[in-house]
Amino acid sequence: MSTTKTRVALVTTPLLQKRGNHPLFPPLGLAYMAAVLDQNGFEVKIIDCPVCELDHEKLKAELSAYQPTIVGIGSMTPTIESALKSARVTKEVCPNAKVLMGGPHATFADEEILTAEKAVDIIVRGEGEETIVEIAQQSPNMQKIGDIKGITFRKDNQIIQTANRPFIQDLDSLPLPAYKYLPMEKYNITGRNLLSIISSRGCPYQCPFCVASQMFGAPFRARSPKKVLDEMEWLRDEYGAEGIAFQDDTLTFDRKRAVEICDGMIERKIDLPWGCGTRADAVTKELVAKMSKAHCDEVMFGVESGCQRMRDVLKKRVTNEQCENAIKWTKEAGIFVTVSVILGYPGETKETLQESLDFVRRVEPDDVWLCHATPFPGTDLRELVKSKGWKMSENWELYNTMNPIFEDPALPAKEIAEIRKNFYNKFYTPKYVMRQAVKGYLKGNLYSKIMTRTGANYMLWRAMARLKLM
Ligand code: B12
Ligand code: SF4
């Protein structure tokens, strides 16, 4: 038995490119793991490089000063190169530390990462809370590492995958995310302290392009309304939250529970504007009215396409009528509506693309995310593109849904990108900015205030780009 105190550093890797327009939220996954490590008596530090504006050199200095025994690095597909570089700099200054990597990219690219990058020792697949505690308990000798479920590791030049870890059944048993390890005053979106909550995990729909449902499984696992409401009050009272972003994939999947949460917000006078994502078939007119009364300011619907044939290909299992109704009711309730649409999924044609854009114009959402179909590791979409033998980029930095990743011979990627750009040029107009300013500043919608600025910035950026071209 070693006497070395196990000290864990959890890292959100530095951004290699400028932040762009991605909001910075506290890293919930790392904060949950920090909380369970803390609960089990381990020493923890979270280093959130993007929000602290740390590059790899500064991260190296932080790690060198802290000398952790375990370093856990999070990974999304576009940040994987940076995450691998973080692993290498860790080994330079803490050669004896075990380097773990987890998150949605590492989970599904475990073997590739361990084969290519010697600085990574263990990949944690799926949910990390229980696994990281078991790893810390075995640190530093890791003699029974093969007994730990949900990991992939190297042994005698072989890569070993242990059995999948069952999903955490009772999410209420988890402690609150350990925000005490994060510089909470630094997280704000256009000047607003907007903090996150995840009240459920898992999604029964398992759409073929979605990573979240693969990470967290099919059963919808939900925290009790009481715990969710307590967390909202805690974020407001302890951390000065001025708004809440629910990070659930389908917040209203269980409508009865959604109503209970809304009723609780009203009864307890929580009074915080909040936003969420859900499916068009998971709301009713009454539910969105109740959500609005509980201060819901934004709902994002993944409509994915405006063409029923394509929506069936995408296995979304909602109809145009359901989408139109959901958007209409939500707008009528005064809520900001975002729709998310996938462009260029295999089977898409110029006509179906046009149908999607016509649909969006017709329903007039407050914002629209036009996402290039992106074959993330772990998705059926990736297997489909591979099986077709189409050219597919392996430059992970491009996997941010704003770039075409594969080439469908029937629909050139360049054309899709051009159609997307033209759509946005016509979407963010002075009229749009005025509409959002009225909804934001006269009617008090938080998301409209944010989009008034974002829309104006987009137009400014476009005008400057044109001037440079002249
Ligand atoms: C919030 C969020 C964001 C925030 C990030 C906030 C943050 N600091 O985490 C923002 C808005 C910035 C964002 C951006 C993007 N996101 Co996002 N996002 C989410 C969302 C909705 C919630 C994340 C979350 O908090 N989950 C809850 C916690 C508990 O889970 P977790 O973070 O995954 O962590 C757990 C495990 O992954 C694991 N784990 C994670 N890290 C580590 C590290 C170690 C060492 C260990 C041991 C374990 C471990 O243990 C944790 C606890 O169980 C997820 C969907 C989802 N349901 O997760 C998508 C998701 C992560 N995003 C996704 C995508 C595609 C993107 C974007 C590429 C594109 C886009 N259009 O938004 C960009 C890329 C950003 C970039 N940096 O380049 C995909 C991931 C695909 C992939 N392979 O990377 C997801 C899964 C959505 C989906 N439906 O597919 N996102
Ligand atoms: S409904 Fe949404 S969260 Fe569920 S699998 Fe489909 S895209 Fe993913």
Image: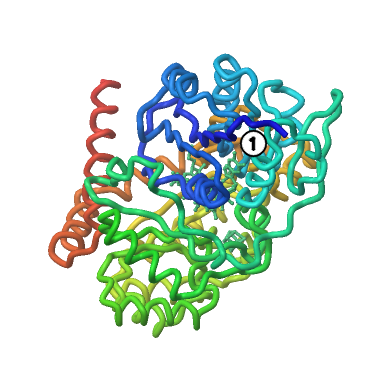
Q: Work out which quarter of the rendered image holds the N terminus and state it.
A: top right
Asked which quadrant contains residue 375, the reply is top right
Where residue 309 sits: x, y (%)?
64, 63
Which residue is at 52% across, 48% downward? 29
Query: Is the distance from the Cβ of mark 1 to the nearest ligand 1 atom less than 8 Å?
Result: no
Q: Work out which quarter of the rendered image holds the C terminus and state it.
A: top left
* Secondary-structure class at tag 1: loop
Where residue 21 sits: x, y (%)?
35, 39
When the figure is inspected, residue 338 is found, relative to residue 155, above or below; the finding is: below
Q: Is residue 149 visible?
A: yes
Query: What residue is shown with label 1?
Result: 406
Which residue is at 27% across, 33% downward? 461
Q: Is residue 447 visible?
A: no
Where residue 200 sits: x, y (%)?
54, 65
Q: Nearer the viewer, residue 66 or 73?
A: 66
Q: Nearer the viewer, residue 219 or 11?
A: 11
Asked which quadrant contains residue 167, the reply is bottom right
